[in-house]
Amino acid sequence: MSQEETNPWVIITVFKENVNPNDLQNIAPQIQSLVDEWQSHGKLMWSGAFSDNLTGMAVFEATKQEADEFFKKYDSICSGSLEYSMYSWDAMPLLSVLSH
């Protein structure tokens, strides 16, 4: 049985124009819960906001299937308030080293 390879992934997020601050307050606990669930399985995730206070980034290591499942959950939480994209980030092999 072959094991699927893990890769670094990045999600870039930007507030939608004219977003309601109440919407952001409502989704923040859901996003935190999703990240907590991810990390409770011993998986590493780094995330934070950029200095523009409109853009954020999360970097994590996962298989393609795990990343797609995480992104699907993220999408169901954030689709009304945020714009976001997920990318495979092949330039970050350091995460593999740090996670061990």
Image: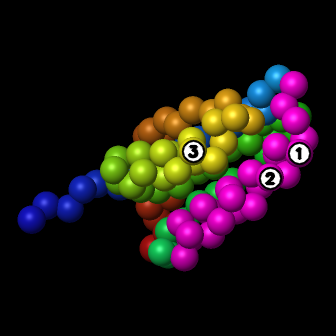
Could you say whether the residue bearing mark 2 is in a helix, strand or loop?
Answer: helix
Task: Locate residue 77, reporting x and y percent.
Answer: 63, 47
Residue at the image position 67 percent from the left and 30 percent from the top: 83
Chosen colour scheme? rainbow
Label 1, label 3: how far apart the Cα atoms are: 17 Å
Image point (42%, 51%), residue name: 69
| 85 displayed left or right of 5 | right
Q: Earlier in the sequence, mark 2 or mark 3?
A: 2
Q: For the residue marked with disc 2, what is the amino acid? A: Asn
Q: Residues within 10 Å of mark 1 (few under 14, many from 20)?
A: few
Q: Earlier in the sequence, mark 1 or mark 3?
A: 1
Instruction: Point out the image quarter for the N terminus.
Output: bottom left
Q: Which residue is mark 3?
A: 76
Residue under label 2: 26
Counting every numbered tag in the picture gives 3
Residue 61: in magenta span = no
- From the viewer's side, name the closer residue of 28 and 99: 28
Report if residue 50 is visible in the image.
Answer: yes
Q: Secondary structure at mark 3?
A: helix
Q: CA distance from mark 1 to mark 2?
A: 6 Å
Q: Position of 30 compared to 2: left or right?
A: right
How far is the residue under mark 2 from the one under mark 3?
13 Å
Question: Circle 1 sits on which residue?
Answer: 22
Residue 29 in magenta? yes
Magenta-colored span: 18-40
Would residue 93 be visible to someone looking at this image? Answer: no
